[in-house]
Image: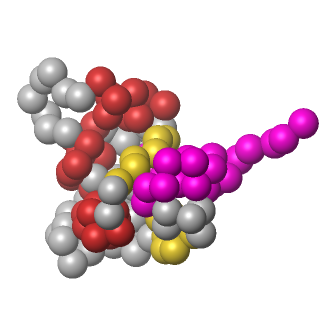
Amino acid sequence: MKVLSTDSILQALCRATGKFGLHIVINTDDAFEEVYKAAPYLGTLSLPADPACVQIYTDGFGWLLFDTKEEMERHFDLTVGDDGPTKLNPYDGPAKVYALTCDNLGVFLNENT
């Protein structure tokens, strides 16, 4: 038996694909309008939204994979978590999106708490 946490799934995805990863967790009690401000890459208020992004909002978590470290870091810097506004996202509202990064070898890099 192998037990996987959401964090170890991120590591396994990154190792298996050779891609850089971002694991995000949202509070599904937050209005989607606010979540989209805290993590604008998830979509816009206009529909139809990307089905994968809608599913992340519904589930409360998801994984994003990137070809480059720079692209992953850009998305991390767009994500407003408990640390508050970031250099790329001035949002300072009620929604917070947890983010954890991982390199293409499965090593954790950064989190926004």
Q: Residue furthest left?
A: 46
**Relative horizontal placement of residue 88, taking residue 59 as reference (left or right):** left
Along the line of sight, the residue nearer the viewer: 55 or 29: 55
Number of numbered tags placed on the structure image: 0
Residue visible at 39% across and 64% down? 81
Question: Is residue 23 one of those drawn in magenta?
Answer: yes
Q: Quadrant of residue 90?
A: bottom left
For residue 66, above or below residue 70: above
Residue visible at 18% across and 71% down? 88
The answer to whether residue 99 is visible is: no
Q: Position of residue 50 (x, y in %)?
A: 23, 28
For residue 28, above or below residue 99: above
Residue visible at 81% across and 42% down? 3
Residue range highlighted in magenta:
1-26
Residue visible at 28% across and 37% down? 32
Q: Position of residue 36 (x, y in %)?
A: 24, 45
The answer to whether residue 73 is visible is: yes
Q: Position of residue 6 (x, y in %)?
A: 63, 47
For residue 22, above or below residue 55: below
For residue 23, above or below residue 74: above
Along the line of sight, the residue nearer the viewer: 61 or 35: 61
Q: Position of residue 19 (x, y in %)?
A: 44, 55
